[in-house]
Image (spheres, rainbow, N blue to C red):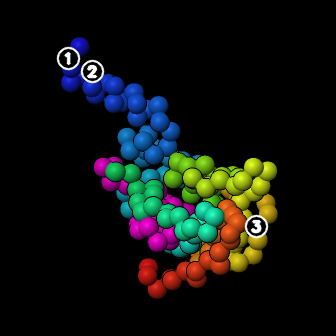
């Protein structure tokens, strides 16, 4: 086998062994029934806001979640910038959840972990939706228009900033 063929094969094996984001770079495969389409959906176009804090420090939600590099498509749930705004642009009018967004992001979400934020031993993360405490499975948090979802580990806990919807 030629050296260049060996390198390409090795790279493909590495990408296929990494879940989520790396695999999606290969073709934008559906995740939780959500397709990676080549245009924005017209049946539903809303925005939710996600803020994350780790012991009082703001954690940035990355830009381009749900927009695989070099594929030319975007998932119905995605981010464009790192301001925490989740764009929900779908060809079907249905309720989407925070769990689906985290699956597209390819990071963990549970009552004790959200991406790199972990609750202390024997503790849970604090989840709020529009300022109200969420005590059920965080994967079930609905993403509705102008919903503000906050995930925090602590103490300390902070008073989250109000989302600026004028930036859309």
The spot of residue 65 in percent (x, y) is 45, 57
Query: In the image, what residue occupies the spot 44% across and 40% down?
Result: 23
Question: Mark 2 vs mark 3: which is more N-terminal?
Answer: 2
Distance CA(mark 3)–CA(mark 1): 56 Å
Q: Residues within 10 Å of mark 3 (few under 14, many from 20)?
A: some
Residue on which the image places disc 3 = 134
Q: Quadrant of the C terminus?
A: bottom left
The stretch of residues the image draws in magenta is 70-95
Q: Are marks 1 and 2 in contact (CB under 8 Å)?
A: yes
* Relative vertical location of residue 157 with respect to residue 96 in this rendering, above or below: below
The residue positioned farthest toward the top in the image shown: 1
Question: Does dot 2 land on a helix, a strand or a loop?
Answer: helix
Distance CA(mark 1)–CA(mark 2): 6 Å
35 to the left or right of 117: left
Query: In the image, what residue occupies the spot 51% across and 69% down?
Result: 84
Relative to the observer, which residue lies in front, 147 or 159?
159
Residue on which the image places disc 1 = 2
Residue on which the image places disc 2 = 6
The residue positioned farthest toward the bottom in the image shown: 166
Query: In the image, what residue occupies the spot 79% across and 60% down?
Result: 136
């Amino acid at each position: 086998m030629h050296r260049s063929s060996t390198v390409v094969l090795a790279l493909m094996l590495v990408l296929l062994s990494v879940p989520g984001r790396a695999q999606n770079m290969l073709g934008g495969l559906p995740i939780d029934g959500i397709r990676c389409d080549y245009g924005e959906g017209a049946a539903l176009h809303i925005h939710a806001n996600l803020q994350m804090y780790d012991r009082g420090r703001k954690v940035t939600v990355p830009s381009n979640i749900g927009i695989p590099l070099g594929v030319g498509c975007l998932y119905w749930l995605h981010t464009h910038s790192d301001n925490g705004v989740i764009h929900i642009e779908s060809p079907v009018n249905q309720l989407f959840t925070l769990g689906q967004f985290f699956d597209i992001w390819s990071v963990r979400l549970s009552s004790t972990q959200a991406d790199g934020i972990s609750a202390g031993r024997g503790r849970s993360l604090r989840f709020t939706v529009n300022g109200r405490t969420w005590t059920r499975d965080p994967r079930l948090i609905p993403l509705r228009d102008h919903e503000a979802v906050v995930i925090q580990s602590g103490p300390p806990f902070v008073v989250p900033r109000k989302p600026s919807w004028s930036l859309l």
